[in-house]
Amino acid sequence: MTTEIPRYFLEMTAQEVRLCGLLLQEHFGDVVEKVGTHLIRSGVLTLRALAHETKLALDLVKKSLCVLVQHGMCTFGPGRRGPAGPVEYRINCERILHMLRYPRYIYTAKSLYGDTGELIIEEILQRGQMTMSSTVKTVADRLTHNMPEGQSMDYSEVVSAFSRLVETHFLQRCPPMASAGSSSSGAVDTSLPVVTQPAEPESNPECYKLPYINLTGQGKRRRSSEDGEDDQRAAKKAKTDNSQCGDEGIYWQVNFLRFHLHFRDQAIISAVSCKLDQTSSEIVRTMLRMSEVTTPAHAAFTQALSANEIFRSLPSNYNIARPILDQYLTLLVDDPMEFVGKTGDSGGGMYVVNLHRALANLARATLESVVQERFGSRSARIFRLLLRKRHLEQKQVEDFAMVPAKEAKDMLYTLLSENLVQLQEVPKTPDYAPSRTFYLYTVNQLPTARLLLQHCYKTIGNLIERRLYETKENKRLLEKSQRIEAILASLQATGAETAQLTEVEEMITAPERQQLESLRHHINKLDSSENQVDETIFLLESYINSTQASR
């Protein structure tokens, strides 16, 4: 029996492969990067084939695969020889690319659920999957360590934040391992269980069910001199701790799809706010919040809501009258951006948020912005004209855009050479004679969005390479700075005198301090650029996925 392979196992471009390799190297090291990149290029491989082709020790390949499986970046299952044959491994490139968004996931958790939510998401992202009890203890210890002496974080507060993250579906249970156990057939060796990849998390009926855990107490403060010993002790005690808490074997992971839906909603709300005003964006926010549970992830529209329901669900600080709400809804429906649509007249009018149309408009605005920044405002005018009119001859472009013929010709050919504009031939006769053929310029938004997405992958790969190069070139200085900071922290903890602290600080010379400041400034700019490019990547990916789902 053959199974359909998802899109993220196929059609990987060179830029995506390069970016995946850089992310794996930065987060997990060279060995995991080598194993992961080889799996991307090869598709599906068994353990021994992977070890043979990468020329790595079998033990190293096993550990690398364990890391990738732990973080959901590698899947496995029966191979071509069936359940009795060796297990085959596939890489999940889409999941690897999610590492670009780790800072954004953590910041979102902080903005919604405070420091506790931030640390919960951070810990689970770092480890791939964790039990609830282990997460609660680790986060409580970290929060306690940063509190003033004599204060500590109670486990119950962390449990409460964890529960809210599960209730809003930002965390979900890892699916149980679907092992078929020993085969009863005599043809198969009964000592070898049939191992299959776990099903999708959403298929588990208890995906968002919190277990009862027997966990009371407070976080423990770690002493800086004992950090290494404490980590070792924590690792040794993990098994016994889980068995006492009652949630052994129940692991949790971050629900990336839920975060992406939140990002999509925020992008739509921000666009409405910029296009119209704050009140309009709050109405759209209310509609999205009301329908977030009932609307499927890849739906083109939200569930229909009546004007009466929207009015009752508006925040109390927005004290607007019902006639004013009707006017705002009419304004949103009539707006050319088509963020909101009207589907009926019952209940004061039935309204939906047009998710696909909103993403298409946001992607279109992104394409227009790129053309304007790279080629100037006149080229952007021609590009917008072609998006709106679909097919135009060169003379029509000159007339509608009010651009001189020579300039219009140069701009069209430049856009054509960059594959941002396409040329379509419509012959009057079968011989395709140039004198009897219409040459129409057009813009196909979906292929153009895919092209820009590949440029974004290349850009973010270049940014990561530059950041790693800067860090490597200044490795000695950074290590010296970290050593001095550690000594200062240790002296401050023991109550050292000011003269001692000043003496240690002077171990870094003025030129070195200036070089450090310059390096940190460059690294921060590169980090900020990575985050901005990733926002564009997310918008384009959302539009492409929405278009494919709506077909």
Image: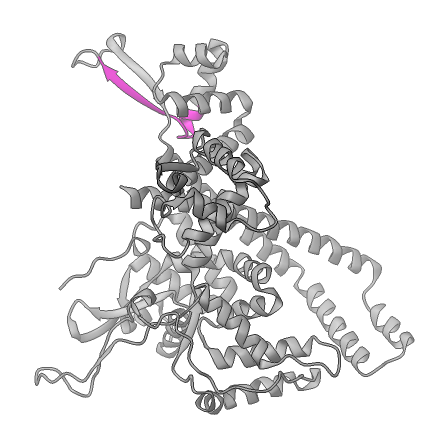
As drawn, 230 above or below 251: below
Q: Is residue 386 visible?
A: yes
Q: Is residue 547 left or right of residue 21?
A: left
**What percent of the width, then of the height, locates residue 547?**
33, 41
Magenta segment boundaries in residue numbering:
414-427
Q: Is residue 10 left or right of residue 131?
A: left
As drawn, 477 above or below 426: below
- Residue 33 position by quadrant: bottom left
Residue 174 in magenta?
no
Q: Is residue 373 left or right of residue 411?
A: right
Residue 422 in magenta?
yes
**What percent of the width, then of the height, locates residue 212?**
44, 82
Residue beneath the point at 22% across and 11% down: 433
Which residue sits furthest right?
A: 499
Quadrant where the image shows the C terminus:
top left
Q: How many marks?
A: 0
Q: Is residue 288 left or right of residue 545?
A: right
